[in-house]
Image: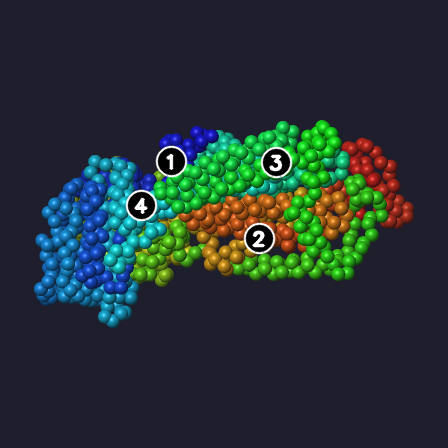
Amino acid sequence: MAATISNDAGELLTPQTPYDFLVQSSLIVRQFDMVEAATALRSEGGGEGEADDTADELVPERSRKASGRYSMMLLFFGKDLFTPEALRTMCEVENVLLGDEHYALTCLNSSDATYRTRGRGGECGVPSMSAVALFYADWALRAGADAFPAAAAPADAPSSASFLRNDSHKRTCIPLGAAYVAARAQEIYALAAASPSKRAEFGFFLSRDTLETAPPRTRATRSLLYMGSPLGGKSSSQAKTKLEASLEAMESALFDYCNMTAGFLRSAYRDSCVVSQLQLKFYAGALESKQFSQMTGEDTTMVLASVVFVTFYIGFHSGSLVMALLGIAQIVLSLPIALFFYSALLRIAWFSQMHILAFFVVLGIGADDIFVFLDAWRQSKALPAHISATLESRLAHAYRRTAFAVFNTSFTTAIAFFATGLSTIMPIAAFGIYAALCIIVNFALVVTWWPTAIIVWEVYLKQPVWELAFAAAFVILGACGFLVAMLSLATMPLLLLLGLCVISLALVVFGARAALTQRRVLRARAQRTRGGGGAEPSEPSAALDVAAAARFGHVEHFFHAHHATALNWAPWPRHAAPPRRSSATDGQGSGARHWQKPTLKPFSLGCAAALLALGLYLSYEALRMEPPNEQEVWFPRDHMLTGLGDEVREAFMVGSDEAYVRGSVWFGLKGFDRAGFNRYKPAENRGELILDEQFELHTADAQHALLGFCGALRNASCAVDGCSRPPYTLVVPEAVVCWLEAMRDSYNHSLPTGEAFAPAVGAWLRSADGAAHSRAVGLIDGELAFTSVSFQSTLRDDLPGKVVRGYYREWKAFLDGFVATAPPALRTAFVSTGGTFVWMVTEAELVQGIYTGFAICFPVAFLVLCVATSSLRISSFAVVSIAMIVGCLLGFVHVALDWSLGVGESIAGTIVIGLAVDYTVHLGHAYTESDSWSREAKTTDALTQMGVTVVAGGITTLGSSVFMYACQVTFFTKMATLIGGTIAFSLLFSLLFFMPLCALAGPSGRIVKMHERAQLLRRRCCAMALRRRKPSRPGGARAAAAAPLQRPTSSASGSCSTSVELQVEHAVAPAASAA
């Protein structure tokens, strides 16, 4: 099966790409693709643009900063960090990275570096964005020296000869003088307070409250180590691999330095790093992505634990190890069969870590379906003889009861997942489709595989010798596992060791319990034989004591004798007369629905009222949920990277330039053609760029407009919270790079026009002055096809979509004002910020998806319930219960856990609808299928038949989801909470809200089936048509109305007047009137 969906590397899981979660239909995403296509047009390698454009051959190796995701940030926290002891410690930490052999191969070696070192691997520039570099510097070359021209050097000021080495990239961490450190620290504090520009430069190294304390001191500082680009002789993919390898080596060196160790389901980042009373944290974007993939891969092992738990519980519920293995085989078998339909027939070539979530869902739902059949099969022994006499009659009864009930729940659950499949976000849509297929395949196996397995077990395997064999196998397997755990005490991770011990002991206990049970069976059989019981009964199902097996179990007895009794108890019961015709079990009209007056039932009324109040309150709180104001958290609370972005934003005076979004405004790109694009292969054949034929810059008007745009952009104001960097404008003025301005300066403020413009641009780009601007100009066949103006924004790159959208609106307003007066050549202007605006769209679609799912799932659930129960009243009760379940779940996580409507909640929103319908539909179907006449008896029948099934299904789904709490990625732990909460509220509302409503006001008598309703509707329509065609009869309207009922019956089905027999009319009419 895996071969049908495996990638080129033969792996089942599809490698992640930056395009997976993009909303392909969004204009912002199309603009993102247009930018990438334009970058590829002007680039030989078509890569990211920063490491592989055509100007790389003119740029010295490693002289330019690589992408920000490949830079390593070191953060230090303490009481006062600008002290000699703290600075020496920070110097030693930096040396851990500077001394690594991989660093020398990828380090930045820019031409403007103050100091250079030469060691193994070549030459490197000494990191300048470093708190250590602020103090380990010559007095004349220190940062900010131009602001203090008359300051004399302290006597203990260091020199570069004392801390730089000739044969290594490390510094010599000499102890600095206290007087020098104090004087230098005062200079840095003064620079940060001098002006907004100096604050932006030196506030990067200072904590937010530095200038508010007396005397000033910083409790947080940091260093930023850049990697270099381009890497000589390396393609884009090779350079990326080399940079990632360098970062991984540096990460490993820091782990060793801090004694941070990883274990099973435990990342090394969950250990803290404290060095000489300084707390150290480190971060790199590429390492964060690698950490997420690694933790997700480890978390998938929890599927095995869930499988073991469900196997044990099926065995416990059925009392047979053989049935447990057959049941879990059916559930697990549904996964690869669904994968076949998913990949081979639907041709979806995407299978990610999110699909692992379907395993947990199917384990719970599959076990619930198995319990429906098992309980129907077991309870058939206690039914009258025409059902319990033979295997065939018992199987027919269990099959009828199971097929319809399981179809209803499977259909509604599958629709809920298919609603998720309509998402515009590809991974979520793919997951929804696969999960829906798993539910459908599981239903098909329940009605084909499972009945066969029941008969095979009953006829051939329900023998003590088989059960004893499997029990012995379980005991031996558990003993071997426990022995392995004991022998691996010193080497195995603690969590893995505990898990193996628990599973091994469970196997031993479960096997021993089964062996003792079969021993008692053999002893009872021998006693019966010695007592003259004769030979074994010929009927295989009577191999054990039928009377003992037919008695209610503990759960069934509780629902029958206690729960149903409490719901039906009334202090002043009213005994309504039964129908005037014969018994309600006749099925032909003798037991038509009869009106039963409601009775005051305190327990039912109290439960329904209390849960209604709870549901309304929590549903109100659910409606108040909003997208998060902070970045989504994917790692555990004690993980070093959890909340690091918010911590940096709150702890430091300003962010680094790399912490703010960089972007560009593009001109000349008109559209993007996606013909032939496959959404399930998002990184392949994304489309073709459409250029604007009207774009040109060879006229003076167009040149003047673009130059004016650059000037206006530097002065553009910003009035939203997203603009958080001084001077709090739309962009950083000095960071706007306009190549046309640079070319104008090179041409003495006189730009060429007409046909001479394009050749002049090409010649200027090949010069030393223009080479740095080659990425902003798109020359195709010697003609200028498009261009861009780059900038650095004042928006941090770690803000949620809610904040980013306000900043995007500021940009849109600015561009709309420019386009309104711009010449036609520049009217296709748009802004691109890489993934920032793109992810903003994704977050908005995630929230919108939950409302779309609700709009689909609730109507479908109501229609299915109407068909399944044939009762508008029961369907209304059930839909209200399902709505309360979903509302209570989302309201609970909002009130109790303070969750927002984030990614996990949005994905789970439609999933929980599918899970919420199961138990209510089961009980509603059992209520309407009851042959009893009164609503009290129907309530008792439904709870007795389906209560044990509902509880067993809830336990297996809860149990399988509990293991997700051991996962590290918070998406899985969130899903464990949401799935577990769904099951808990489903049990609560189905048993204590839905069933009390049925006990209070449920329909009584025989529930008229849907096909009978259709026959009645057709019969009445035909009667009305006949009345209109025939002349009026004497006797008035009453005689005319009664006339159709006096006609003789006929078997001619094609005639409107004889399509339904009169006895059906008599049987159904009272029920329809009551309805």
Query: Do labels 4 and 3 touch, CB within 8 Å?
Result: no
Above or below residue 217? Residue 679 is above
Residue 1054 quadrant: top right
Image mark for residue 567: none
Query: Do labels 3 and 2 touch, CB within 8 Å?
Result: no
Q: Is residue 284 left or right of residue 747?
A: right
Q: Nearer the viewer, mark 3 or mark 2?
A: 3
Label 1 or label 3, whichever comes before in sequence order: 3
Label 2 or label 1, whichever comes before in sequence order: 1
Whole-percent x and y of residue 957?
Answer: 54, 45
- The residues tagged by marks 3 and 2 sit, at their Cα atoms, a distance apart of 38 Å
Q: Nearer the viewer, mark 4 or mark 2?
A: 2
Image mark for residue 684: 1
Above or below residue 126? Residue 384 is above
Label 3 or label 2, whichever comes before in sequence order: 3
The residue at the point 79 percent across, 57 percent down is 574
| SS at mark 3 in the image | helix
Give the labeled residue for mark 3. Answer: 518
Label 4 or label 3, whichever comes before in sequence order: 4
Residue 79 quadrant: bottom left
Give the labeled residue for mark 4. Answer: 286
